[in-house]
Image (cartoon, grey):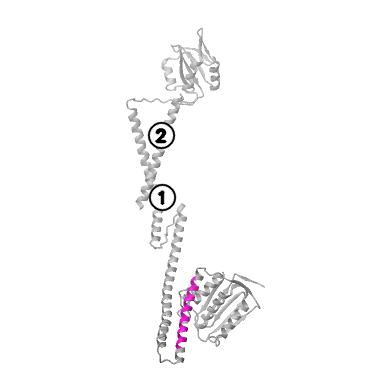
Amino acid sequence: MNLNITARYLISVIFIFITVFLVNSFIFLGLIFYQQVNGTAFFTSEYGEDFARSFADDFSIDDDNIILSPSGYEKLEESGVWIEILDENGTVVQSFPSDHKSEEHYRPIELIHRYKYMDDDLNTYFIGEFAPYSYLVINPNLDVSRYTFLVNNENIFRSTLVFITITFLVNLLISLLIGYIFSHFFTSPIKRMTKHIRALKDRVFIKDRSTEKGIYKQVFADLNDVAKTLNEFDRERNKLEKMRNDWIRNVSHDIKTPLSSIRGYAELLKSEALTDDERLHYARVVERQSLYIRELLDDFNLSLRLRNNEIALQIERTDIVVFVREIVIDLLNDPQFQSEDIEFLHDQPSSFWEIDRHLMKRAILNLIYNALIHNEDVTVKVIISHDLITIEDNGIGITEEEQEMIFERYYRATNTKDIQGTGLGMAIAHDIIKAHEGRISLESELNKGSKFSISMNKKTNR
């Protein structure tokens, strides 16, 4: 994988180099061809060789007098040059303008040195010809140089090919070297990223502790955040899986026990020796156990529907003081709880909340049942104060470890001495309050009791 990334990067560098090399070569050859087609020398300036040769068409001879055309004079004025006409012996016979003359006579060797080797530091010389004369175009303002190349025509193609090949190979090696060095810094973070991603795929949530900088800094930070989040999700999933398995075992036991009772009493009911009172007693036991199983299944279904937001709340504007007082009164009128010590307190005559009355009653009752069932000789206080519903008791309390899981669907506290209820009461209460966009909190200390507080966002004031 690592070699594959590096190889692909180097191939990309080679491809880019070859493309640039070919494009530059075509551009260079195209410019030369363009210059040749338009009749201009590639390396000459505006007032160079071609400019000097163009004066041949501006000269004419009349009675042995050399005449320069008006267009020729215009070119002289524009360029700032002058022209000297030489006969076949190198003698200057005439100049344009007439007041400019460098020499009276030029020897052949002087012409060669001034033209080819540019021995005159002040002026640049160009040579032209019109029969039977030759002429010098002398430019004092031109900053140019001449270079002489000797080319073997037989070897020019081979030499050009060797030059192009050597240039190509040298540039290719340089590109590969630079590309390899750069790829090391470029692909090294990518290798670590792929390793990190592979670890995430294998559920190995390792934090990359490298201090990457530059463009990859945020990428590594995001990968570390993903690893952290997935690690937390994995721990939470394992915790929920354990609680689910524990809950299934508890529920299986809770269902198996009444089912065994139902089966046993059903077999007894077959006996013809039973009296009517015994038959009625057994029938009531079967009914009670079947109701318990139905309650367990109903609670499980309600819990799932609340977690999946499948229940539409029937919101009503409700005086929460009156509402909770009626719940406490109904509870004390229940023969099962009429001997329990339950107090109702409030510090305001009324407080109106937007609630689903049926579900909220279920949540409050579950919290009160939890305090009564899991404690002995307990005093439960239901208090409405400062827009809070507080349910507190002076029972055995809940450990810190259990407080973190008390609202989970699959959790049954270790302080449960009596297997009454379905084990879903606290989770249902939590989900009902959450469905109301409210909040429930727990404060508890061992041997000192517990306190549940409910607050709501959807409440109105009179």
> Where is residue 41, by image quadrant?
top left
Q: Which amino acid, mark 1?
A: Phe
Residue placed under numbered mark 1 in the picture: 186
Q: In this rendering, is residue 131 above or below 192?
A: above
Q: Is residue 366 visible?
A: yes
Q: Magenta residues, as a range?
A: 281-304
Residue 405: assigned label: none
Return the disc, 1 or 2, that comes first in the chain's sequence: 2
Q: In this rendering, is residue 21 above or below 83?
A: below
51 magenta-colored = no
Q: How far apart in space, not on screen, are marks 1 and 2 (Cα)?
A: 30 Å
Place of residue 240 in the rendered image (x, y in percent of width and height, measured from the top left): 44, 71
**Helix, strand, or loop for circle 1?**
helix
Q: In this rendering, is residue 10 above or below 41?
A: below
Place of residue 136 in the rendered image (x, y in percent of width and height, measured from the top left): 47, 17
Q: Quadrant of the C terminus?
A: bottom right
Residue 25: assigned label: 2
Left or right: residue 454 compared with residue 133? right
Q: Secondary structure of the magenta portion, mostly? A: helix
Between marks 1 and 2 in the image, the one whose residue lies nearer the viewer: 2
Place of residue 91 in the rendered image (x, y in percent of width and height, measured from the top left): 46, 12
**Helix, strand, or loop for circle 2?**
helix
Left or right: residue 309 compared with residue 177? right
Q: Residues within 10 Å of mark 1 (few under 14, many from 20)?
A: some
Place of residue 125 in the rendered image (x, y in percent of width and height, measured from the top left): 47, 20
Q: In this rendering, is residue 385 above or below 188?
A: below
Q: How many marks?
A: 2
Q: Residues within 10 Å of mark 2 (few under 14, many from 20)?
A: few
Q: Residue furthest top?
A: 63
> Where is residue 172, by image quadrant?
top left
Q: Is residue 41 visible?
A: no
Foreground residue among 251 and 26: 251
